[in-house]
Image (cartoon, helix red, strand yellow):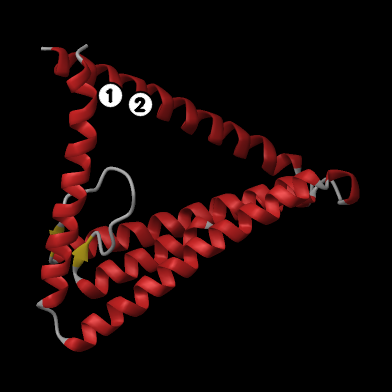
Amino acid sequence: MNPGTNVQPSVTKKEARENIRLQLAQYVGQQPGSTQSLHRWMKRLEVAGVGIIVGAFVVALYVSIAWESVNPLVIPIAWFGFAASVAPAMIFLGLDAITLRAFPPVVWPGRPPKFVTGSGAVWRGWGFILLALVAAAFWGFFAYAVGTLNFALIAPLITFLGVVMGVGMAVSIVVRLIRDISRSR
């Protein structure tokens, strides 16, 4: 592998992110003032959603460190709460995409998705909201099962989580292998 190969993908991601930022700015600039104002408020709510994630992480970390002085059941419940804490940010992101009719409505770090406007963006926004509600319900139900020590609920939840994680890891490995093989040709 030559040294130039490792540099190119990071430049490409950076350029793609800047391109999406430019497309989003141009699209938002063409929208009416009320839509622009609503988009600004939604961005603030998305930041608040990220704050909820950070707060939930700090609480979960604190109860894990202070394990001797807290009820042992609080520790897993706090971590399940942290897992569910992504829901508000995802809901706000979905609502922003629906009202703006553009996806992604904000550019986050990492590999940016394709910029979509119109009904495709609305569907993606609804998808984010649905995914957030399902994730919050699952982790909330898991926290309830652990908090009440209901082993009849915990066993199938653990089995389901194990199967989903196993399938997810297998699919990830296969996709990565296919991507690596296609790049080498």
Q: Position of residue 144 (x, y in %)?
A: 70, 54
From this viewpoint, which residue is outermost toward the front? 3
- Which residue is labeled 2 in the image? 172
x and y percentages locating residue 149 in the rendered image? 79, 45
Which disc, if any, is residue 52? none
Q: Amino acid at mark 1?
A: Val
Q: Which residue has dot 1 on it?
A: 175
Task: Please determine whether, in this image, residue 148 is positioned above or below residue 50.
Answer: above
Q: Is residue 167 visible?
A: yes
Cβ atoms at labels 1 and 2 below 8 Å apart = yes
Q: Is residue 89 left or right of residue 178?
A: right
> Badge 1 local density, few (<14 within 10 Å), some, or many (20+)?
few
Residue plotted at (28% across, 57% down): 107
Is residue 14 left or right of 127 when viewed as pictured? Answer: left
Residue 172 shown left or right of residue 120 in the figure: right
Seen in the picture, residue 53 relative to 146 is either above or below; the reply is: below
| Image quarter of residue 116 | bottom left
* Percent of width and height locating residue 5: 19, 21
Three-letter amino acid code at the position of disc 2: Ser
Crowd band around label 2 with a 10 angstrom C-alpha radius: few (<14), some (14–19), many (20+): few
Question: Element type at marker 2?
Answer: helix
| Residue at far right of view | 69
Q: Is residue 116 above or below residue 72?
A: below
Residue 34 vs 92, above or below: the answer is below
